[in-house]
Image: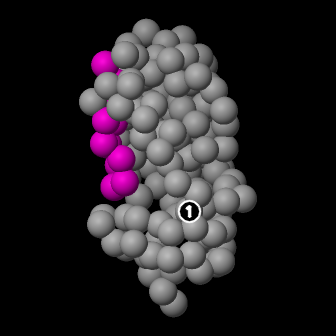
Amino acid sequence: MTESRRIVMTHAIEVAVGVRKEDPRLLFTEDVRAWSPNLAATSLSELETAFADRNDALSNIVVVITGLDVAGNKAFAEWVLDADHTGPLVIDDIRVEPTGRRLQVGGVTIADFRHHRIEAFRTYFDSIALLEQMVE
């Protein structure tokens, strides 16, 4: 079961940042709870809406998972995202117009599993460091 959770976690991160197209229903439970500095959802339908409403602020996105561990029903992933800032980006109620810069941010996602799907996840990244790259 550990290997299948590793695969689901990898796919979920890729879907969340927009580099993978996969039906979220295969990865998340109906009552999934999600939080990050730019996302909050308390159901699969809210999560799907958030993914669909994702703007085109970033393009040429590459996400590399640098560490991924599974312990029981929890998975922990460290990742680095690189992307071009090509559209307006809103983080913590701050809107930054496109700069064309290549941005990089590292983060961590922690997920709780129910069987083979994620029932809750939290993603942490340094939103201030991301904003600083846009205004340098």
Relative to residue 29, is residue 89 depicted above or below?
Answer: below
Residue positioned 69% across, 54% down in the render: 62
Task: Please name whichever residue, 136 or 75, is drawn nearer the observer in this view of the structure.
Answer: 136
From the viewer's perspective, tell me whether residue 16 is left or right of residue 121. right
As drawn, the residue found furthest toward the bottom would be 136
Tell me residue 31's x, y (percent): 31, 19
Residue picked out by circle 1: 57
**Does the magenta stretch mainly form a helix, a strand or a loop?**
strand
Q: In the image, what residue type sits under mark 1?
A: Ala
- Determine the secondary structure under disc 1: loop
Residue positioned 58% across, 37% down in the render: 15
Tell me residue 81's x, y (percent): 59, 57
Task: Please name whichever residue, 52 or 135, is drawn nearer the observer in this view of the structure.
Answer: 52
Label 1: how many Cα within 10 Å (few below 14, some 14–19, many 20+):
some
User: Which range is magenta?
Assistant: 31-41
Quarter of image, res 20: top right
Relative to residue 13, is residue 81 depicted above or below?
Answer: below
Relative to residue 50, is residue 107 depicted above or below?
Answer: below
From the viewer's perspective, tell me whether residue 87 is left or right of residue 51. right
Relative to residue 119, is residue 131 depicted above or below?
Answer: below
Residue positioned 27% across, 30% down in the render: 42
Residue 123 appears in view:
yes
Magenta-span inclusion, residue 2:
no
